[in-house]
C-alpha cells in the first residue's frame, strides 16, 4: 500500500513531478515522497516522452543528467547552481518559457483536492492529478 508521502520541512508531503508541453498540457506525471530529490524522477519521466528541449530549475543541475540529455539529443536549459565550479551557459530566451511549467502547477493547485491531498493512496492521488491535468489541458 504505497502512499508516496514523506517528511519535508516537518510535515508529510508528496511531490508532483510533471513534464509539460509548450501549450501547458501535462505530457507525463509522477509522484514521490516529499523528502526525495527532484532529480530522481527526471529520467523516468523523460522515458515517457521525447522532448526537444528540457527546461528545469537549478535542482536538476547535475552532470550525469545533462550528459544523458545531450546523448538523447535533448537541449538542456538548466541554470547552474551557485557552487558549480564551471558554470554552464544557457539560453535565457528559452529559460523564460519555464513560466509555462509554473503556471501549470499554479492551475493544478487551484483544485482543493490536489492542494491539500485528501487521498491516502498514491494511485488514487495520481489518478486525481491526472484527471485535473486533463481538465487543465481541455481549457
Image (spheres, helix red, strand yellow):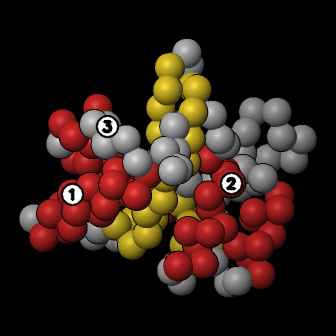
User: Is 139 situated above or below 61?
Assistant: below
Residue beneath disc 3: 117
Q: Which mark is residue 132?
A: 1
As measured in the structure, the alpha-carbon distance from the residue carrying label 2 to the one carrying label 1 is 24 Å
User: Is 49 situated above or below 91?
Assistant: below
Name the residue at 58% across, 26% down.
7
Residue beneath disc 2: 40
Q: Closest to the observer: 114 or 42?
A: 114
Work out which residue is located at the far front of the displayed protein and give it. 1
Q: Which dot, 3 or 2, sits closer to the camera?
A: 3
Name the residue at 40% across, 58% down.
123
User: Is 99 situated above or below 118?
Assistant: below
The answer to whether mark 3 and mark 2 are in CB contact below 8 A is no
Give SS at disc 2.
Answer: helix
Q: Is residue 98 left or right of residue 108?
A: right
Give SS at disc 1.
Answer: helix
Going from N to C along the chain, the mark reached first, 3 or 2, is 2
As measured in the structure, the alpha-carbon distance from the residue carrying label 3 to the one carrying label 2 is 22 Å
Give SS at disc 3.
Answer: loop
Amino acid at each position: 500500500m504505497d502512499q508516496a508521502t514523506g517528511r519535508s520541512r516537518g510535515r508529510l508531503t508528496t511531490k508532483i513531478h510533471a513534464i509539460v508541453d509548450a501549450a501547458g498540457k501535462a505530457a507525463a506525471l509522477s509522484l514521490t515522497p516529499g523528502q526525495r530529490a527532484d532529480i530522481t524522477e527526471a529520467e523516468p519521466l523523460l522515458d515517457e516522452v521525447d522532448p526537444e528541449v528540457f527546461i528545469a530549475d537549478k535542482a536538476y543541475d547535475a552532470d550525469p543528467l545533462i550528459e544523458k540529455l545531450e546523448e538523447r539529443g535533448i537541449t538542456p536549459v538548466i541554470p547552474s547552481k551557485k557552487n558549480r565550479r564551471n558554470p554552464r551557459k544557457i539560453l535565457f530566451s528559452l529559460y523564460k518559457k519555464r513560466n509555462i511549467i509554473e503556471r501549470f502547477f499554479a492551475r493544478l493547485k487551484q483544485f482543493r483536492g490536489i492542494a491539500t491531498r485528501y487521498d491516502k493512496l498514491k494511485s488514487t492521488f495520481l489518478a486525481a492529478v491526472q484527471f485535473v491535468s486533463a481538465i487543465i489541458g481541455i481549457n
